[in-house]
Image (cartoon, grey):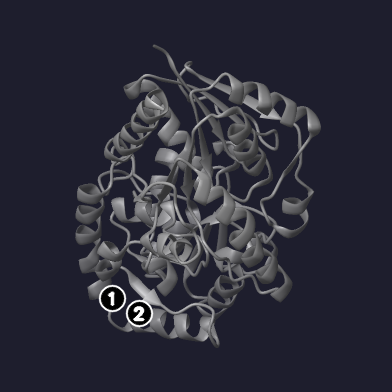
Amino acid sequence: MAKHLALVTHYFSTHRGGVEKVAAELAKRLAENHGWGITWIASDADLVPDNLPLSIRLFPVHAWNVLERRTGIPWPVWSPGALRHLWRVIGQSNAVHLHDALYFGNAFTWLFARVRGVPVIITQHVGSVPFRSALLRAVHAFANRTLGRLVLSTAHQVVFISPAVRQEFERFCRFRALPVYCPNGVDTAIFTPDGAAAADKAIVNARHAGKRVFLFVGRFVEKKGLNVLRELAAEFSDDLWIFAGQGPLDPGNWALPNVLVVRGVSGAALARYYRAADLLVLPSVGEGFPLVVQEAMACGTPAMVGDETAAGCPDARRLLLVENVGTGNTAVRWARRLSGLRENPHPLLALRPEVAKFAHQSWSWESTTAVYARLLDAIELRKSAS
Protein backbone atom coordinates (compact mmCIF):
# COMPACT_ATOMS: atom_id res chain seq x y z
CA MET A 1 0.00 0.00 0.00
CA ALA A 2 1.36 3.43 -0.99
CA LYS A 3 2.34 5.72 1.86
CA HIS A 4 1.89 9.44 1.33
CA LEU A 5 3.29 12.16 3.55
CA ALA A 6 2.38 15.85 3.47
CA LEU A 7 5.46 17.88 4.43
CA VAL A 8 4.85 21.50 5.41
CA THR A 9 7.51 24.13 6.09
CA HIS A 10 7.53 27.92 6.01
CA TYR A 11 10.08 28.00 3.14
CA PHE A 12 11.77 25.58 0.77
CA SER A 13 15.41 24.58 1.27
CA THR A 14 16.43 27.14 -1.38
CA HIS A 15 15.81 29.76 1.33
CA ARG A 16 18.98 28.30 2.92
CA GLY A 17 17.73 28.22 6.50
CA GLY A 18 18.71 25.31 8.71
CA VAL A 19 15.13 24.13 9.33
CA GLU A 20 14.36 23.95 5.62
CA LYS A 21 17.64 22.17 4.85
CA VAL A 22 16.80 19.54 7.47
CA ALA A 23 13.33 19.09 5.97
CA ALA A 24 14.85 18.51 2.52
CA GLU A 25 17.38 15.95 3.75
CA LEU A 26 14.76 13.96 5.64
CA ALA A 27 12.27 14.07 2.76
CA LYS A 28 14.88 12.91 0.26
CA ARG A 29 15.82 9.87 2.31
CA LEU A 30 12.27 8.98 3.36
CA ALA A 31 11.35 8.96 -0.34
CA GLU A 32 14.43 7.10 -1.61
CA ASN A 33 14.94 4.55 1.18
CA HIS A 34 11.65 4.14 3.04
CA GLY A 35 8.95 4.15 0.38
CA TRP A 36 7.20 7.41 1.20
CA GLY A 37 5.61 9.52 -1.50
CA ILE A 38 5.86 13.13 -0.34
CA THR A 39 4.11 16.37 -1.19
CA TRP A 40 6.13 19.32 0.09
CA ILE A 41 4.18 22.55 0.53
CA ALA A 42 5.98 25.80 1.34
CA SER A 43 5.87 29.52 0.58
CA ASP A 44 6.71 30.76 -2.89
CA ALA A 45 9.39 33.16 -1.57
CA ASP A 46 12.14 31.23 -3.40
CA LEU A 47 12.71 28.95 -6.36
CA VAL A 48 11.77 25.33 -5.73
CA PRO A 49 14.64 22.87 -5.11
CA ASP A 50 15.82 20.98 -8.18
CA ASN A 51 17.85 18.23 -6.50
CA LEU A 52 15.12 16.05 -4.98
CA PRO A 53 13.69 12.68 -6.10
CA LEU A 54 10.76 12.67 -8.52
CA SER A 55 8.63 11.01 -5.83
CA ILE A 56 8.65 14.34 -3.96
CA ARG A 57 6.07 16.74 -5.41
CA LEU A 58 6.80 20.41 -4.72
CA PHE A 59 3.95 22.91 -4.31
CA PRO A 60 4.96 26.53 -3.76
CA VAL A 61 1.96 28.47 -2.44
CA HIS A 62 1.39 32.19 -2.51
CA ALA A 63 2.42 33.97 0.67
CA TRP A 64 3.16 37.50 1.88
CA ASN A 65 6.72 37.61 3.18
CA VAL A 66 6.77 41.24 4.28
CA LEU A 67 7.69 40.50 7.90
CA GLU A 68 10.96 38.80 6.99
CA ARG A 69 11.93 41.42 4.43
CA ARG A 70 11.42 44.25 6.89
CA THR A 71 12.46 42.72 10.21
CA GLY A 72 14.25 39.44 9.48
CA ILE A 73 11.55 37.41 11.25
CA PRO A 74 10.72 34.42 9.00
CA TRP A 75 6.92 34.29 9.27
CA PRO A 76 5.23 34.27 5.84
CA VAL A 77 1.45 34.66 5.77
CA TRP A 78 -0.24 32.25 3.37
CA SER A 79 -3.04 33.32 1.04
CA PRO A 80 -6.58 31.89 1.15
CA GLY A 81 -5.83 29.97 -2.04
CA ALA A 82 -2.80 28.40 -0.38
CA LEU A 83 -4.94 27.25 2.53
CA ARG A 84 -7.52 25.71 0.17
CA HIS A 85 -4.74 23.75 -1.56
CA LEU A 86 -3.37 22.70 1.82
CA TRP A 87 -6.79 21.32 2.81
CA ARG A 88 -6.92 19.15 -0.31
CA VAL A 89 -3.40 17.76 0.08
CA ILE A 90 -3.94 16.85 3.72
CA GLY A 91 -7.06 14.92 2.79
CA GLN A 92 -4.97 12.80 0.39
CA SER A 93 -2.20 12.00 2.91
CA ASN A 94 -1.56 9.22 5.40
CA ALA A 95 0.37 11.54 7.71
CA VAL A 96 1.58 15.12 8.05
CA HIS A 97 5.10 16.24 8.99
CA LEU A 98 5.56 19.77 10.36
CA HIS A 99 8.82 21.53 11.20
CA ASP A 100 8.12 23.76 14.23
CA ALA A 101 4.69 24.62 15.56
CA LEU A 102 4.23 28.37 15.27
CA TYR A 103 4.54 29.21 11.58
CA PHE A 104 1.35 30.44 9.91
CA GLY A 105 1.04 27.60 7.39
CA ASN A 106 2.08 24.99 9.95
CA ALA A 107 -0.61 26.05 12.42
CA PHE A 108 -3.29 25.77 9.75
CA THR A 109 -1.88 22.41 8.68
CA TRP A 110 -2.24 21.13 12.25
CA LEU A 111 -5.83 22.42 12.38
CA PHE A 112 -6.81 20.88 9.03
CA ALA A 113 -5.15 17.56 9.89
CA ARG A 114 -6.98 17.46 13.19
CA VAL A 115 -10.33 18.10 11.51
CA ARG A 116 -9.66 15.46 8.85
CA GLY A 117 -8.25 12.87 11.26
CA VAL A 118 -4.77 12.73 9.69
CA PRO A 119 -1.89 11.95 12.11
CA VAL A 120 0.68 14.68 12.69
CA ILE A 121 4.38 14.37 13.52
CA ILE A 122 6.21 17.58 14.47
CA THR A 123 9.93 18.25 14.56
CA GLN A 124 10.45 21.09 17.02
CA HIS A 125 13.75 22.85 16.36
CA VAL A 126 13.63 25.93 18.59
CA GLY A 127 12.31 27.06 21.93
CA SER A 128 12.31 30.60 23.31
CA VAL A 129 14.02 33.28 21.24
CA PRO A 130 15.45 36.11 23.40
CA PHE A 131 14.77 38.97 20.98
CA ARG A 132 16.21 42.34 21.97
CA SER A 133 12.68 43.74 21.76
CA ALA A 134 10.76 43.08 24.98
CA LEU A 135 7.52 43.08 22.97
CA LEU A 136 8.76 40.38 20.58
CA ARG A 137 10.01 38.28 23.51
CA ALA A 138 6.63 38.51 25.19
CA VAL A 139 4.68 37.71 22.00
CA HIS A 140 6.86 34.68 21.21
CA ALA A 141 6.68 33.33 24.77
CA PHE A 142 2.90 33.75 24.79
CA ALA A 143 2.62 31.99 21.41
CA ASN A 144 4.70 29.04 22.65
CA ARG A 145 2.56 28.64 25.78
CA THR A 146 -0.75 28.88 23.94
CA LEU A 147 -0.66 27.82 20.29
CA GLY A 148 2.62 25.94 20.64
CA ARG A 149 1.37 24.08 23.68
CA LEU A 150 -1.88 23.14 21.94
CA VAL A 151 -0.19 21.93 18.74
CA LEU A 152 2.59 19.96 20.44
CA SER A 153 0.33 18.44 23.08
CA THR A 154 -2.12 17.06 20.51
CA ALA A 155 0.37 15.88 17.87
CA HIS A 156 0.67 12.12 17.46
CA GLN A 157 4.45 12.40 17.84
CA VAL A 158 6.91 15.20 18.66
CA VAL A 159 10.61 15.02 17.85
CA PHE A 160 13.10 17.45 19.38
CA ILE A 161 16.51 18.05 17.83
CA SER A 162 17.84 19.31 21.18
CA PRO A 163 17.33 18.01 24.72
CA ALA A 164 17.40 21.61 25.97
CA VAL A 165 14.43 22.53 23.77
CA ARG A 166 12.62 19.35 24.84
CA GLN A 167 13.11 20.24 28.52
CA GLU A 168 11.76 23.73 27.92
CA PHE A 169 8.50 22.47 26.40
CA GLU A 170 8.14 19.64 28.91
CA ARG A 171 7.57 22.29 31.57
CA PHE A 172 4.16 23.20 30.13
CA CYS A 173 3.21 20.54 27.54
CA ARG A 174 1.54 17.19 28.19
CA PHE A 175 2.46 15.13 25.16
CA ARG A 176 0.19 12.56 23.57
CA ALA A 177 3.19 10.22 23.14
CA LEU A 178 6.60 10.26 24.75
CA PRO A 179 8.64 12.90 22.89
CA VAL A 180 11.77 11.73 21.09
CA TYR A 181 15.18 13.39 21.01
CA CYS A 182 16.78 12.87 17.60
CA PRO A 183 19.68 15.10 16.49
CA ASN A 184 19.92 16.20 12.90
CA GLY A 185 22.23 14.27 10.63
CA VAL A 186 25.17 15.41 8.53
CA ASP A 187 26.10 14.34 5.01
CA THR A 188 29.56 13.10 5.92
CA ALA A 189 30.35 12.33 2.28
CA ILE A 190 30.27 16.09 1.60
CA PHE A 191 31.19 17.58 4.96
CA THR A 192 34.55 15.98 5.59
CA PRO A 193 38.03 17.25 6.47
CA ASP A 194 39.37 15.52 3.37
CA GLY A 195 39.08 17.90 0.47
CA ALA A 196 40.02 21.27 -0.92
CA ALA A 197 39.53 24.50 0.99
CA ALA A 198 37.99 27.61 -0.54
CA ALA A 199 40.60 29.58 -2.45
CA ASP A 200 39.12 33.09 -2.55
CA LYS A 201 41.82 35.71 -3.03
CA ALA A 202 41.03 37.23 0.37
CA ILE A 203 41.55 33.85 2.09
CA VAL A 204 44.81 33.18 0.24
CA ASN A 205 46.12 36.64 1.16
CA ALA A 206 45.09 36.20 4.79
CA ARG A 207 46.93 32.89 5.01
CA HIS A 208 50.07 34.33 3.45
CA ALA A 209 49.98 37.17 5.98
CA GLY A 210 49.56 34.78 8.92
CA LYS A 211 46.06 36.03 9.71
CA ARG A 212 43.30 33.96 11.24
CA VAL A 213 40.15 33.14 9.29
CA PHE A 214 36.85 33.27 11.19
CA LEU A 215 33.62 32.01 9.64
CA PHE A 216 29.92 32.62 10.18
CA VAL A 217 27.32 30.56 8.30
CA GLY A 218 23.61 31.27 8.46
CA ARG A 219 20.90 33.86 7.98
CA PHE A 220 21.91 37.49 8.57
CA VAL A 221 19.29 38.10 11.27
CA GLU A 222 19.23 39.28 14.87
CA LYS A 223 19.02 35.94 16.65
CA LYS A 224 22.21 34.75 14.94
CA GLY A 225 24.19 37.40 16.86
CA LEU A 226 25.06 39.68 13.93
CA ASN A 227 25.39 42.67 16.28
CA VAL A 228 28.03 40.79 18.28
CA LEU A 229 29.83 39.66 15.15
CA ARG A 230 30.00 43.21 13.84
CA GLU A 231 31.81 44.32 16.99
CA LEU A 232 34.17 41.35 16.82
CA ALA A 233 35.02 41.93 13.17
CA ALA A 234 35.82 45.58 13.97
CA GLU A 235 37.86 44.59 17.04
CA PHE A 236 39.91 41.94 15.19
CA SER A 237 40.57 43.99 12.08
CA ASP A 238 43.79 42.10 11.33
CA ASP A 239 41.86 38.85 10.84
CA LEU A 240 39.58 37.83 7.99
CA TRP A 241 35.89 37.36 8.74
CA ILE A 242 33.82 35.35 6.26
CA PHE A 243 30.03 35.58 6.32
CA ALA A 244 28.31 32.89 4.26
CA GLY A 245 24.58 33.52 3.99
CA GLN A 246 22.02 36.19 3.29
CA GLY A 247 19.48 38.33 5.10
CA PRO A 248 18.51 41.88 6.07
CA LEU A 249 21.46 42.56 8.43
CA ASP A 250 23.99 42.40 5.61
CA PRO A 251 27.65 42.46 6.78
CA GLY A 252 28.52 43.81 3.36
CA ASN A 253 27.09 47.15 4.55
CA TRP A 254 29.43 47.40 7.54
CA ALA A 255 32.24 49.03 5.52
CA LEU A 256 34.82 46.75 7.17
CA PRO A 257 37.69 45.82 4.80
CA ASN A 258 38.35 42.54 6.63
CA VAL A 259 34.81 41.20 5.98
CA LEU A 260 34.15 38.85 3.06
CA VAL A 261 30.48 38.08 2.27
CA VAL A 262 29.78 34.87 0.37
CA ARG A 263 26.27 34.25 -0.96
CA GLY A 264 24.51 31.27 -2.45
CA VAL A 265 26.93 28.52 -1.39
CA SER A 266 25.80 25.16 -0.08
CA GLY A 267 26.86 21.53 -0.08
CA ALA A 268 30.39 20.88 -1.37
CA ALA A 269 31.01 24.57 -2.06
CA LEU A 270 30.12 25.45 1.53
CA ALA A 271 32.32 22.62 2.86
CA ARG A 272 35.31 24.34 1.25
CA TYR A 273 34.70 27.42 3.40
CA TYR A 274 34.41 25.33 6.55
CA ARG A 275 37.78 23.74 5.77
CA ALA A 276 39.35 27.13 5.06
CA ALA A 277 38.34 28.55 8.44
CA ASP A 278 40.17 28.34 11.74
CA LEU A 279 36.94 28.66 13.69
CA LEU A 280 33.18 28.85 13.18
CA VAL A 281 31.92 31.76 15.33
CA LEU A 282 28.21 31.59 16.13
CA PRO A 283 26.87 33.76 18.99
CA SER A 284 23.28 32.78 18.20
CA VAL A 285 20.33 32.28 20.54
CA GLY A 286 17.02 30.48 20.45
CA GLU A 287 17.71 27.79 17.85
CA GLY A 288 18.44 24.45 19.49
CA PHE A 289 21.62 22.98 17.99
CA PRO A 290 22.24 24.56 14.57
CA LEU A 291 23.04 22.32 11.62
CA VAL A 292 25.96 24.58 10.65
CA VAL A 293 27.80 23.61 13.85
CA GLN A 294 27.48 19.94 12.92
CA GLU A 295 28.63 20.62 9.36
CA ALA A 296 31.64 22.62 10.54
CA MET A 297 32.68 19.91 12.98
CA ALA A 298 32.34 17.23 10.30
CA CYS A 299 34.81 19.28 8.22
CA GLY A 300 37.23 19.37 11.16
CA THR A 301 36.53 23.01 12.02
CA PRO A 302 35.98 23.81 15.72
CA ALA A 303 33.00 25.98 16.67
CA MET A 304 32.61 28.75 19.22
CA VAL A 305 29.00 28.96 20.41
CA GLY A 306 26.88 30.27 23.24
CA ASP A 307 26.10 28.20 26.31
CA GLU A 308 22.48 27.80 25.19
CA THR A 309 23.59 26.33 21.87
CA ALA A 310 26.06 24.00 23.60
CA ALA A 311 23.19 22.70 25.75
CA GLY A 312 21.54 21.58 22.51
CA CYS A 313 24.03 18.70 22.23
CA PRO A 314 25.53 17.78 25.63
CA ASP A 315 27.70 15.03 24.12
CA ALA A 316 29.49 17.58 21.92
CA ARG A 317 30.03 20.22 24.60
CA ARG A 318 33.55 19.09 25.51
CA LEU A 319 34.61 19.77 21.92
CA LEU A 320 32.98 23.21 21.65
CA LEU A 321 34.36 26.58 22.67
CA VAL A 322 31.55 27.89 24.85
CA GLU A 323 30.90 31.48 25.96
CA ASN A 324 27.86 33.11 27.50
CA VAL A 325 25.53 35.07 25.21
CA GLY A 326 23.01 37.71 26.16
CA THR A 327 24.09 38.79 29.65
CA GLY A 328 26.23 41.90 30.01
CA ASN A 329 28.58 42.77 27.16
CA THR A 330 28.71 39.61 25.07
CA ALA A 331 31.15 41.03 22.52
CA VAL A 332 33.72 41.83 25.22
CA ARG A 333 33.66 38.27 26.58
CA TRP A 334 33.91 36.74 23.12
CA ALA A 335 36.74 39.10 22.16
CA ARG A 336 38.65 38.09 25.28
CA ARG A 337 38.29 34.43 24.33
CA LEU A 338 39.40 35.04 20.75
CA SER A 339 42.43 36.98 22.00
CA GLY A 340 43.41 33.98 24.11
CA LEU A 341 43.25 31.75 21.06
CA ARG A 342 45.70 34.04 19.29
CA GLU A 343 48.16 33.83 22.17
CA ASN A 344 47.90 30.03 22.29
CA PRO A 345 46.54 28.56 19.03
CA HIS A 346 47.70 24.98 19.68
CA PRO A 347 44.56 23.73 21.54
CA LEU A 348 42.43 24.92 18.62
CA LEU A 349 44.59 23.08 16.11
CA ALA A 350 44.52 19.95 18.26
CA LEU A 351 40.71 20.01 18.24
CA ARG A 352 40.40 19.62 14.47
CA PRO A 353 40.83 15.84 14.20
CA GLU A 354 38.80 15.31 17.38
CA VAL A 355 35.76 17.28 16.22
CA ALA A 356 35.81 15.57 12.82
CA LYS A 357 35.98 12.13 14.42
CA PHE A 358 33.13 12.93 16.82
CA ALA A 359 30.88 14.29 14.06
CA HIS A 360 31.42 11.35 11.74
CA GLN A 361 30.78 8.85 14.54
CA SER A 362 27.74 10.65 16.00
CA TRP A 363 25.72 12.07 13.14
CA SER A 364 24.41 10.63 9.89
CA TRP A 365 21.30 11.33 7.89
CA GLU A 366 20.76 7.61 7.38
CA SER A 367 20.38 6.88 11.09
CA THR A 368 18.33 10.03 11.70
CA THR A 369 15.94 9.22 8.85
CA ALA A 370 15.56 5.65 10.12
CA VAL A 371 14.22 7.07 13.41
CA TYR A 372 11.59 9.10 11.54
CA ALA A 373 10.66 6.13 9.36
CA ARG A 374 10.03 4.00 12.47
CA LEU A 375 7.96 6.75 14.08
CA LEU A 376 5.86 7.23 10.95
CA ASP A 377 5.30 3.49 10.61
CA ALA A 378 4.27 3.30 14.27
CA ILE A 379 1.79 6.14 13.73
CA GLU A 380 0.35 4.27 10.75
CA LEU A 381 -0.03 1.10 12.84
CA ARG A 382 -1.76 2.96 15.65
CA LYS A 383 -4.12 4.58 13.16
CA SER A 384 -4.96 1.22 11.55
CA ALA A 385 -5.61 -0.37 14.93
CA SER A 386 -7.92 2.38 16.14
Above or below 238: residue 72: above
Q: Report the quarter where the C terminus lies.
A: top left
User: Residue farthest to the top?
Assistant: 1
**Residue closest to the eye, 212 or 319:** 319
User: Could you say whether the residue bearing mark 2 is in a helix, strand or loop?
Assistant: helix
In percent of the image, x 54 and y 79: which residue is there? 326
Horizontal and vertical percent for residue 355? 25, 59
Residue kind at label 1, given as amino acid type: Pro
User: Could you say whether the residue bearing mark 1 is in a helix, strand or loop?
Assistant: loop
- Mark 1 is surrounded, within 10 Å at the Cα level, by few (under 14), some (14 to 19) or many (20 or more) other residues, namely few
Q: In which quarter of the image is residue 269?
A: top left
Residue at image mark 1? 345
Horizontal and vertical percent for residue 307? 41, 74
**Residue closest to the eye, 158 or 193:** 158
Side of 120 relative to 219 (left or right): left
Residue 299 visible in image = no
Horizontal and vertical percent for residue 163? 36, 61
In percent of the image, x 66 and y 74: which residue is there? 132
Mark 1 vs 2: CB contact within 8 A: yes
Q: Which mark is residue 375?
A: none
